[in-house]
């Protein structure tokens, strides 16, 4: 077999192996196949360097041991992470009484790990908006009321006038979702008004960077170019504080959804309605403005969407599944036109291109095995009629090899807790954990609703009483421990990662003696009152 090592020096080869190894190791995408390929090249060149059989045998034995260790440390299999994305222009309406079907709660296969809910046109009148700044908005409260009892926690949210983006995650995943950041960009009134624009949440899910963009783009048939210009500007302009990712498209996966306002060109209203009524949606796809733009615009390349096998989601009469029957009112009277049905509400996604990872063909193949996206279902929900838009949902399975296998922080409550004395918390952090003086540990009731839903908290530095390489301890003052006790847990909030990097097991806080004494006094007072009543009645 002919060898081709003569064209390069041995030092060049070893340098290349080192550089490539570092690059692939940083992405976590160099698998066994790629490693074996590199080793085969190394063995070939070793034959040129030395004819010592013992040396080659020693090297071969070392490589076998390395593979054995690597195999033990690698995750045994891919992990499925199920996401349910909702987009809905709610037309300033309040939440309906029932959302079970929209959240898949009435389905036997409702095992969702992450809900991402993007709303547009949430009521943003001055009184409502100021109230929502001080307190959670009605939609957030309603969704927390529904999802918290089912074991979900509101992970993050961002609001810009009528745009609202929420993320709810199953409790067990909380320590593995890190580096959570939010951002927004206004595009209305030349960038000065937030009635149009986008709100974004990005996060690391088991080490994979995901970005979710909820957008409301300009309306009307003739504004296609403005819609495209606004979205391109969002992709270029949005940055996140303290991030290592250069731009939105540098994330491993980007989900783009919202009221994107793209319309169906050329066809008239009667033809569109006839096609929709006969369920021949495919006849309209080639005239959909977004489908047309995806073929032409470079910045949209790579964005994927499921087939539009559901009715156009706009525009409907309120509380019905009948398309717009009202004439649009103009300044001079009722001589405007009715709106043509359109797929304005969309969900798209983009998986980072393998070529951008600077991997060769074999490594790229292995990268596909580390992170895959499967669209399970893409549909609209016709039964909801609170606005002139129908909600759209996309259910995805993210198949991934976890890059984070253990929580960054482990913590536990020490000894018996009650309100009669200060209590201790012990915690340990992983190597290279980005701790900060702004980190804190919160005391949460079991079943807490969101990250800031703590009863009390302790600063990890200000309230620290001991510190070592292996373990640190902080205390919580007795005055801050709930008197009535109950089931609680601890959560370590990392300021630099903006997440709960560790969650303790649930533990019991015993009622304090102060409360017991108070209850006893109240019982005595009740007995005394009853005695006085009997005495006054002549008994």
Image (tube, helix red, strand yellow):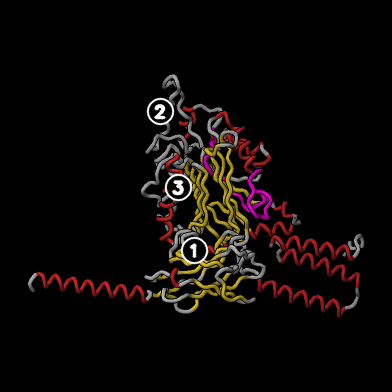
Asked whether, in this view, residue 432 is left or right of residue 348, the answer is right
Q: Which residues are magenta?
A: 237-263
Whether residue 156 is visible to the viewer of this picture, yes or no, is yes
Q: Quadrant of the C terminus?
A: bottom left
Asked whether, in this view, residue 273 is left or right of residue 59, the answer is left
Magenta-colored stretch includes residue 248: yes
Q: CA distance from mark 2 to mark 3?
A: 33 Å
Residue pictured at 38% horizontal, 70% vertical: 483
Q: Nearer the viewer, residue 327 or 180?
A: 180
Q: Secondary structure at mark 3?
A: helix
Asked whether, in this view, residue 414 is left or right of residue 246, the answer is left
Disc 2 residue crowd, few under 14, some 14–19, many 20+, Cα 10 Å: few
Name the front one of labels 2 and 1: 1
Numbered badge on residue 99: none
Name the front one of labels 1 and 3: 3
Asked whether, in this view, residue 508 is left or right of residue 195, the answer is left
Magenta-colored stretch includes residue 526: no
Name the front one of labels 2 and 3: 3
Whether residue 377 is visible to the viewer of this picture, yes or no, is no
Q: Which residue is mark 1?
A: 171
Disc 3 residue crowd, few under 14, some 14–19, many 20+, Cα 10 Å: some
Residue pictured at 71% horizontal, 66% vertical: 32
Q: Which residue is at the far top?
A: 332
Q: Earlier in the sequence, mark 2 or mark 3?
A: 3
Q: Which residue is mark 2?
A: 326
Q: Position of residue 321 (x, y in %)?
A: 40, 37
Q: Which residue is mark 3?
A: 132
């Amino acid at each position: 077999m002919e060898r081709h090592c003569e064209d390069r020096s041995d030092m060049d080869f070893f340098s290349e192996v080192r550089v490539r190894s570092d690059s692939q190791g940083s992405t976590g995408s160099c698998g066994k196949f790629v490693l074996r390929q590199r080793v085969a090249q190394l063995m070939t060149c070793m034959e040129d360097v030395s004819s010592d059989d013992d040396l080659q045998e020693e090297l071969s034995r070392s490589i076998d041991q390395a593979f054995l260790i690597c195999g033990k440390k690698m995750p045994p299999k891919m992990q499925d992470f199920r996401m349910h994305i909702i987009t809905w222009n709610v037309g300033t309406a309040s939440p309906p009484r029932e959302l079970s079907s929209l959240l898949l709660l009435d389905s036997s296969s409702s095992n969702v790990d992450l809900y991402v809910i993007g709303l547009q046109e949430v009521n943003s009148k001055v009184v409502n908006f100021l109230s929502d700044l001080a307190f959670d908005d009605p939609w957030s409260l309603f969704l927390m009321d529904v999802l918290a009892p089912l074991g979900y926690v509101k992970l993050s949210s961002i609001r810009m006038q009528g745009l609202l983006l929420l993320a709810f995650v199953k409790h067990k995943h909380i320590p593995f979702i890190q580096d959570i950041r939010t951002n927004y960009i206004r595009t209305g009134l030349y960038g000065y008004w937030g009635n149009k624009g986008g709100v974004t949440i990005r996060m690391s899910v088991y080490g994979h960077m995901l970005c979710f963009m909820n957008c409301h783009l300009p309306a009307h048939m003739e504004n296609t170019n403005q819609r495209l210009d606004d979205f391109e500007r969002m992709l270029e302009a949005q940055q996140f504080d303290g991030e290592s990712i250069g731009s939105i498209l540098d994330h491993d996966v980007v989900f783009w959804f919202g009221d994107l306002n793209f319309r169906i060109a050329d066809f008239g209203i009667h033809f569109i309605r006839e096609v929709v009524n006969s369920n021949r949606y495919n006849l309209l796809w080639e005239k959909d403005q977004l489908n047309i733009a995806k073929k032409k615009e470079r910045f949209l390349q790579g964005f994927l969407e499921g087939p539009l096998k559901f009715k156009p989601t706009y525009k409907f009469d309120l509380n019905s599944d009948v398309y717009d029957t009202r004439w649009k009112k103009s300044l001079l009277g009722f001589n405007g036109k009715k709106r043509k049905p359109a797929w304005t509400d969309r969900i798209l996604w983009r998986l980072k291109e393998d070529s951008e990872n600077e991997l060769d063909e074999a490594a790229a193949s292995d990268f596909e095995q580390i992170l895959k996206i499967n669209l399970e279902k893409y549909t609209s929900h016709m039964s909801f009629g609170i606005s002139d838009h129908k909600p759209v949902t996309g259910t995805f399975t993210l198949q991934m090899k976890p890059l984070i296998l253990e929580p960054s922080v482990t913590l536990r409550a020490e000894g018996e807790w009650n309100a009669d004395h200060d209590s201790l918390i012990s915690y340990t952090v992983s190597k290279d954990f980005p701790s900060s003086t702004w980190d804190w540990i919160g005391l949460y009731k079991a079943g807490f609703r969101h990250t800031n839903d703590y009863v009390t908290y302790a600063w990890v530095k200000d309230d620290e009483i001991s510190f070592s390489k292996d373990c640190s301890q902080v205390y919580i003052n007795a005055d801050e421990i709930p008197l009535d006790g109950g089931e609680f847990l601890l959560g370590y909030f990392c300021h630099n990662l903006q997440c709960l990097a560790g969650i303790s097991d649930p533990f019991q806080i015993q009622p304090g003696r102060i409360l017991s004494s108070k209850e006893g006094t109240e019982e005595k007072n009740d007995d005394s009152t009853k005695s006085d009543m009997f005495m006054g009645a002549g008994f």
